[in-house]
């Protein structure tokens, strides 16, 4: 669950990080008005769109074959047996 939460947190913060790098590379970071409400609103909407797309991708890719059961990773005789669908 932590992996899913961190993945979506990174997806949300990605537009803000890219904008900060762009400001730094163009040497505009000395102006505090560059982080005004306009860019923050668009960055937030873009971050939320990334999170929604991330949820959709994870929900479609994390499925097993129809009618199969997931068997978790087990330790048998001191050896890890990887999990999978049966």
Image (cartoon, grey):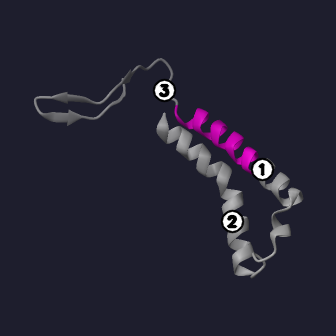
Residue denoted by label 3: 65
Residue at image point 33% right, 26% down: 72
**In the image, farthest residue toward the right:** 38
Q: Quadrant of the C terminus?
A: top left
Residue at image point 70% right, 80% down: 25
SS at badge 3:
loop
Q: Earlier in the sequence, mark 1 or mark 3?
A: 1
Residue denoted by label 2: 18
Residue 23, how many percent across, how many down?
Answer: 74, 74
Residue 20, how many percent across, how many down?
Answer: 70, 68
Residue 52, how many percent across, how many down?
Answer: 71, 40
SS at badge 1:
helix
Q: Residues within 10 Å of mark 2 (few under 14, many from 20)?
A: few
Magenta span main SS = helix
Residue at image point 66% right, 57% down: 14
Foreground pick, 55 / 69 = 55
**In the image, farthest residue toward the left:** 77
CA–CA distance between discs 1 and 3?
A: 36 Å
CA–CA distance between discs 1 and 2?
A: 13 Å
> What is the span of residues highlighted in magenta in the rendered image?
47-62
Residue 9 part of the magenta segment: no
Residue denoted by label 1: 44
CA–CA distance between discs 3 and 2?
A: 38 Å
């Amino acid at each position: 669950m932590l992996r899913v939460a961190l993945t979506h947190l990174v997806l949300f913060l990605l537009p803000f990080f890219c904008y900060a790098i762009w400001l730094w590379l163009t040497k505009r970071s000395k102006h505090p008005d560059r982080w005004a409400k306009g860019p923050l609103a668009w960055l937030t909407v873009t971050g939320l769109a990334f999170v929604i797309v991330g949820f959709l991708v994870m929900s479609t890719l994390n499925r097993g074959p129809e009618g199969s059961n997931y068997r978790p990773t087990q330790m048998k005789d001191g050896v890890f047996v990887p999990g999978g669908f049966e």
